[in-house]
Amino acid sequence: MLKGINPLLSPELLKTLCEMGHSDRIVIADGNFPAETFGKNSKVIRYDGQDIPALLDAILSVFPLDTYVEKPVTLMALMERDVGKIETPIWDEYKAITAKHDERGADAVGNIDRFKFYEEAKEAYAIIATGEKAVYANVMLQKGVVKG
């Protein structure tokens, strides 16, 4: 155990976050995301049974978001056929959590097309496979720098 470190941050995850450099990305994937398929060239860290909001809050407590890009927090946009049919209240949770840790608040959060998200996920440094049940709950974070 460490003082001041959220206990959701496992040694493996802390090591991974520390190893990442400026502009590296990490995906926090919902339970439906094909993490092992897209993570063939990445580290895949299992967090089965864990929901994303609590984990996102824990990660952002130690992880600087990139200030050199407009939207360092990326969500998977709804497919056209799902617009108006599927609600995504978890996105509001993500925006509130981001605002807690980044002065840009909800403005740091953006959406990209599902298939573009998949392509970018293939290039991510790591993918965290969670048990999140909400749909369209995947989130990608781009690492910034710690200024000292």
Image: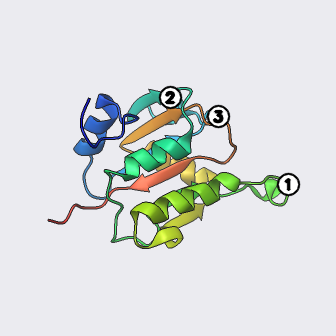
Few, some or many residues within 10 Å of mark 1 (<14, 14–19, 20+): few
Mark 3 falls on what kind of element? Answer: loop
Q: Tell me which residue sits at (33%, 56%) in the image.
A: 143
Of the two numbered discs 3 and 1 on the same chain, state the one appearing first in sequence. 3
Residue 49 pos. (x, y %): 56, 27
Locate the C terminus and report the quarter of the image it occupies: bottom left
Mark 2 falls on what kind of element? Answer: helix
Query: Label 3: which residue?
Result: 32
Q: Nearer the viewer, residue 5 or 72?
A: 5
Cβ atoms under marks 3 and 2 closer than 8 Å = no
Residue 41 visible in the shown view: no
Q: CA distance from mark 3 to mark 2?
A: 11 Å
Residue 101 pos. (x, y %): 40, 61
Which label sits on residue 36? 2
Amino acid type, label 1: Lys
Q: Nearer the viewer, residue 49 or 116?
A: 49
Residue 18 visible in the shown view: yes
Q: Is residue 23 left or right of residue 75?
A: left
Amino acid type, label 3: Asn
